[in-house]
Image (cartoon, rainbow, N blue to C red):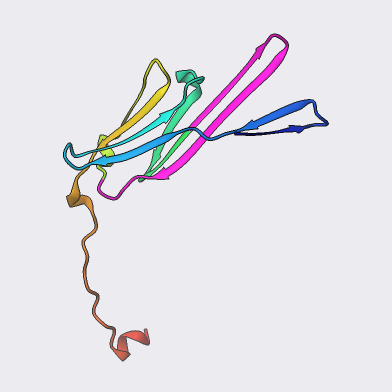
Amino acid sequence: MTSRAIQDGKLLLLLGNRRVEEKADEKDGKFAVKVDLSGFKPEEITVQLRGNEMTITGEHKSDEGGFHLSRDYSRRFILPGDVDLSSVTSHLSKEGMLTIEASVNPALLPRERNLEKLSNSQRKR
């Protein structure tokens, strides 16, 4: 975690990383990501899936004892090619652990294939 004063010392900015666990369990045929979002309410968290790109964001603002508190979280990652995108689910525990799970289907992986060499007439097109 790092910190620095901004706006002539009127604001203290704290920067840190949250722990993220990512795993694919071949035995269970599951892919799972766990993100610690303790300190965020469920309505402050957004999980979006566009194709195989997942974005997790969180924004928390509050005023306590004359202090304005603001907390932001953002994480973007690409789901593996063997993840069945229609099976993706998310769950936030009472402790603030966000779990994202999906089924893994090896048949979804792209197959390797050899491309034919182009002849001189095909290259001129």
Side of 11 relative to 73 (left or right):
right
Picture quadrant of residue 6: top right
Q: Where is residue 68 in the image (x, y as percent from the top left)?
A: 69, 18
Question: Residue at horizontal 45%, vertical 19%?
Answer: 42
Residue at the front extreme?
Answer: 1
Q: Where is residue 103 in the image (x, y as percent from the top left)?
A: 22, 38
Magenta stretch bounds: 57-82
Position of residue 124 relative to residue 55, above or below, is below
Residue at the right extreme?
Answer: 8
Position of residue 109 relative to residue 57, above or below, is below
Magenta-highlighted stretch: main secondary structure? strand
Side of 122 relative to 74 (left or right):
left
Residue at the bottom extreme?
Answer: 120
Position of residue 13 relative to residue 114, above or below, is above
Q: Where is residue 11 in the image (x, y as percent from the top left)?
A: 75, 27
Number of numbered labels in the structure image: 0
Side of 82 relative to 43 (left or right):
left
Please say whether residue 73 is one of the residues in the magenta stretch: yes
Question: Residue at horizontal 19%, vertical 49%?
Answer: 106
Q: Which of 1 and 123 is in front in this view?
A: 1
Screen quadrant of the C terminus:
bottom left
Q: Nearer the viewer, residue 49 or 34?
A: 34
Question: Residue at horizontal 32%, vertical 91%?
Answer: 120
Please say whether residue 100 is one of the residues in the magenta stretch: no
Q: Where is residue 96 in the image (x, y as percent from the top left)?
A: 43, 20
Screen quadrant of the N terminus:
top right
Picture quadrant of residue 35: top left
